[in-house]
Amino acid sequence: MHFSILYKIFLLSFIVFSFSPVNAQNIQGIILNNKKFPVSGAYVHNLNNDNHTHTSSLGHFSITGATGDSIQVSHIGYKTRTFIARANDNRIEIQEKLNLINEVVIAPGINSLELFSKVNTNINPVTSSQDLLRKVPGMIIGQHAGGGKAEQIFLRGFDIDHGTDVSIDVDGMPANMVSHAHGQGYSDLHFLIPEAIQGISFGKGPYNTEKGNFATAGFVSFRTKNRLENSFIKAEAGQFDTKRLLGMFSILDNYNHSAYIATEYLATDGPFESSQNFNRINLMAKYAGKVGANNSLTASLSRFTSKWDASGQIPVRAVESGLISRFGAIDDTEGGETSRTNLILEYDHQIDENSSVQSNAYYSEYDFLLFSNFTFFLEDPVYGDLIKQKETRTMFGLNSEYNHRFSLKDWYGDLQAGISLRNDQSDENELSHTYERLTTLSYFSLGDINETNLAGYFNAALHSGKWIINPGIRLDHFNFQYYDRLAAEYSTLSQEKTILSPKLNFLYNAKNNLQLYLKSGKGFHSNDTRVVVRRASENILPAAYGSDLGMIWKPISEMTINTAFWYLFLEQEFVYVGDAGIVEPSGKTERKGIDLSLQYQPLSW
């Protein structure tokens, strides 16, 4: 029923927009850097008619205008350049430059807030995924249990745990793990090599149509580099026998093709009396190239392994009584190991000067083993309360988005229509009571999870004068299946659910240094499969309703300010009780607040 409605919406939109007349001449060209390589994502602005666009992955652009118009090109890390449009062969070269805030242009687009993280990422070095997440203004990160677990995330009044209310992806591949052994939405970003990151895009609130599950408080998307500026080796050392070795090597680098490999090794014993014995190895290889005149292909393969010991949390009374020191432990058998292998393929096809298709497919194999002790000897005074959480997961999916640029009388804009499929198969998803990691005393839960998410969405950005109207709608369908290995008889429990998520955003570009916006939308986060199939009456896909009223302002060229009043209502929140293997519904919640972000660069150096 819902899919037939969405199909009709898509069909009508294509009929209206795909064949809409383009009344003005189109100016086409390509943007290159000083090495004659294409620059993707550059902002191209026609100063005569105020039309704007961004370059494709191949550096191409097409914008409404006429020969002789003044065209401005800007991009973080490059000098802004203005040129006079020619009838053909607009090959424009832009020069790299120190990242200065006075070069930042507040583009009349939906995600202008990204300029905050783009400046920070290019200026400040990062050495961990925690550093990368901290580039999102207002996002706070904490790490515990030996450094091998995913980070604890806080945003807009949420203790998001490890990702329940923020959607995170890398090159279009989800980092969030649904129905994870340790918690819903678990997002371990340690498979990322920080120096391989090209940029970060983010958004707060449930306002982006292309983002689905977990995008309630917001989303964060990482893009890895397609090519290296230089090959290099880096060695670092610090306290507690901490060492890091990094190598990144370009193996192919020309106009049409590029490829590189990267490897990272990190180890530390940590500051605790019981050695952390932490080590992590990352391997990555990536290729990017042109496939014909109008197509591009990227392929990346990565492997990550990590192992660690942890001292865990300790009771204050044990320290105060002198039983242990501040850096001691009650149970130092905590810790774990994890690994992940990823394959990502991306294919961009330029249909014509106004239309393109971007597609990506991913495959991931993932292993997770974690030992934790939250209550020491409360439940079992003889063997202790150590628990094991374990799973072996296979995840695969694809996303495909059609983009069309249209012009109709006083309106112009962009249309997106997309589909996505994701399947997670988590085998022997286990929670058990164990003794010193070696002996399983009893099982709390053990079973196989198969969860599928099929989605479609439609989004439009309609420009008229200083206004942008951005309506969108998204439809998600879930199929949950669970085989309980502890049940007396074989039975696969299943449940299905569909949710419709409309969005509507308004932007007013008052001046070239001031943008006002009002955003509103509905999002959701899914519940754990094991809970869904056993308690079908409870909320499976609780909705989140949000709105933002704010502005982005550059009062002077060296300063950028963002402020917003925001509101978010959730139909249901979940609290994961790890040592009991359950997800507890905690009721409806309502949040409201003020965001304030300010960047000031008083001196050019």
Image (spheres, grey):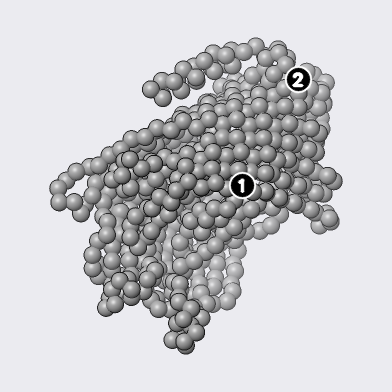
Q: Position of residue 9 (x, y in %)?
A: 50, 19
Q: Position of residue 340 (x, y in %)?
A: 41, 53
Dot in front, 1 or 2: 1
The answer to which image quadrant residue 479 occupies is top left
Q: Which residue is mark 2?
A: 65
The answer to which image quadrant residue 546 occupies is top right
Q: Which residue is mark 1?
A: 592
Which residue is more in the foreground, 124 or 489? 489
Q: Relative to 210, is 49 above or below?
A: above
Distance between mark 1 and mark 2 Cα atoms: 43 Å
Say whether disc 1 or disc 2 marks the residue closer to the N-terminus: 2
The crowding category of the residue bearing disc 2, from other C-alpha atoms within 10 Å (few below 14, some 14 to 19, many at least 20), is many
Q: Position of residue 497 (x, y in %)?
A: 37, 34
Which residue is more in the foreground, 312 or 254? 312
Q: Secondary structure at mark 1?
A: strand
Q: Amino acid at mark 1?
A: Lys
- Which of the image's four quarters has the C terminus? bottom right
